[in-house]
Image: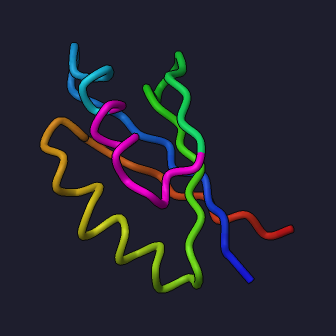
Amino acid sequence: MSIRAYVLINTQIGQTQRVAEELKKISEVKKLDIIMGPYDIIVEIEVSNYDEISKLLLEKFQNIPAINHTMTCPVVS
């Protein structure tokens, strides 16, 4: 069974498109939208277990320098 989550991402000014292009290269990212509001990007991720969410964020998302902040919302049903 796979685990899905939504990750809301705030980027540095003027870097949203560049961050989106980097995120699209990550296999666990299943859907990506650039949005308006307090966050700039929302992505849907899919991993095999809850531990993989943390690993993905720490090892891949945090290596993108133009990301200022993320909020992760696991899907519960």
Relative to 60, say whether 69 is above or below: above
Q: Locate residue 12, reporting x and y percent.
A: 21, 26
Residue 76 sits in quarter: bottom right
Residue 63 included in the magenta stretch of the image: no
Relative to 20, say whether 71 is above or below: below
Colour mapping: rainbow
Residue placed most toward the observer, 25 or 8: 25
Q: Locate residue 6, reporting x and y percent.
A: 60, 52
Q: Is residue 49 left or right of residue 67?
A: right
Q: Locate residue 27, reporting x and y percent.
A: 44, 57
Residue 9 sits in quarter: top left
Relative to 70, say whether 19 is above or below: above
Residue 29 included in the magenta stretch of the image: yes
Q: Is residue 1 left or right of residue 5?
A: right
Q: Residue at x 52, y 19 (%)?
A: 37
Report the number of numbered marks: 0
Q: Is residue 47 left or right of residue 68?
A: right
Q: Locate residue 70, reporting x and y percent.
A: 39, 49
Q: Residue at x 62, y 60 (%)?
A: 5
Residue found at the very far left of the displayed protein: 65
Quadrant of the frame with the N terminus: bottom right
Q: Residue at x 22, y 57 (%)?
A: 62
Quadrant of the frame with the C terminus: bottom right
Residue found at the very far right of the displayed protein: 77
Residue placed most toward the observer, 76 or 28: 28
Q: Is residue 69 left or right of residue 14?
A: right
- Where are the magenta residues, as a range? 20-30
Q: Residue at x 18, y 46 (%)?
A: 64
